[in-house]
Every structure is written in C-alpha cells, then in structure tokens.
Image (spheres, rainbow, N blue to C red):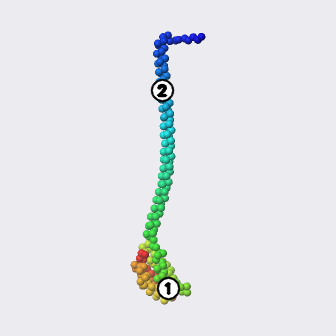
Amino acid sequence: MKKRINLLTKKKDYIKRESFFKRVQKITYICGFIALSLTIIFYATNQRLQGEHKGLLFEKEQKITSLLVDKQGEKKISFINKKGDVLKKALEQDINFDTYYPYLHAYLLSEYNTESSNAATLEKIFIDNKQKLNLTFKLYNEESLYNLLYSTKQDPLLELFNELAIDKITSSGETYEVVLVGQLKKI
C-alpha cells in the first residue's frame, strides 16, 4: 500500500490551488497555440514577401541592364546623328562634279575624242564649293582652237553656267592653251 503525504492540510485550499493551476495551464496552452499560430503566419508572410522582394530585385536588375543597353544604343544613335550632320554639311559644300562633267565633256570635248584625233586635251579642272569653275585645255592645232571657242558660245553649254568667260589664251607654236573661268548653275 502506498502512502501519500498531503502537504496541503486543508482540502479547500488544495482545490482552489489546483483550479488556479489548471487555469494557468489552459491559458498557457492558449498562449502557446496563439504564439505558434502567429509564428507560422509570420513565417509564411515573410517567405511570401521575400519572394516578392527577390522578384522585384530581379526586375530592377533587368531594367538597369536594359537602360544601360539603351544608353549604349542612344550613344550609337547620337554618334550616327553627328556623323549625319557632318555628312549633311559636307554634301552642302560638295561641288557635285559628277553631274557637270558629262555635260562639259559632251559640249567641249566630244568632237576631239575620236581615237584617230589627238587635237585637244583637258589639262586641269578646278571647282570650288561656290561652283566657280576653272578649266584649262591644251589644243594641238588652230582648227581645234576655233572649234573650242565656237562651242563655248553655244546655248546648251551656256545653260550650265551663270557666267562663262575666256580667261587667257597662250600659244607656243602650234600648241594653244585656253583657260575658261565661270560660275556653274546648280543642277
């Protein structure tokens, strides 16, 4: 047989204390359950927010890299625009001689350009960006000289020029040098 020692001498005190401890136990269980529930809720919320944060950081990195790529693209576009401006200025100053040469050749040298004839050569051509022209011809006989002088007064050739004049004619024996100066019209 077991014997128990009752330290509480009065049964009423024992019942009061036992009910108090049972209440404390129940409150502790409830507080523990609430704490555990809150911990689980906070953990889940934290995990969700960390996932969103990581996604936002990834999106931020992508946007920063795209901005850097865009800046490089903007630099390239700016570079191309600058080159375009330089080209535009160069084209404004260009004399565009390739449009004038066929006309000059046709009206001034066409009759001399046969394979059997070496009557005239175009020695120098100078055109500045203001469309001022300086042509030097070398002619090897008197007939070539007359033909050149006659062709400078023809209407198709004069339509290319605002003004055209003979600057000088020099001769050394049967060789003549004729210098024409003029102002070209824009074609």
Residue plotted at (50% across, 54% down):
69
Tally of numbered discs: 2
Residue 20 lies left or right of residue 3; in this view the side is left
Residue closest to the far front: 1
Q: Which residue is mark 2?
A: 30
Asked if the residue at tag 2 contacts the one at tag 1, i.e. Cβ–Cβ closer than 8 Å, the answer is no
The nearer-to-camera label among 1 and 2 is 2
Residue 114, percent from left and from top: 53, 85
- Answer above or below: position of 107 versus 31: below
Mark 1 lies on a secondary structure that is helix
Residue plotted at (48% across, 79% down):
102
Residue plotted at (57% across, 11% down):
3
Residue closest to the far left: 162
Residue type at mark 1 is: Glu
- Could you give the CA–CA distance between mark 1 and mark 2, rounded to whole angstroms? 119 Å
Residue plotted at (48% across, 47% down):
60
Q: Which residue is mark 1?
A: 111
Q: Nearer the viewer, residue 169 or 105?
A: 105
- Answer above or below: position of 39 versus 163: above
| Mark 2 surroundings within 10 Å by alpha-carbon count, few (fewer than 14), some (14 through 19), many (20 or more) | few
Answer whether residue 173 is visible to the viewer in this image. Answer: no
Q: Which quadrant is home to the N terminus?
A: top right
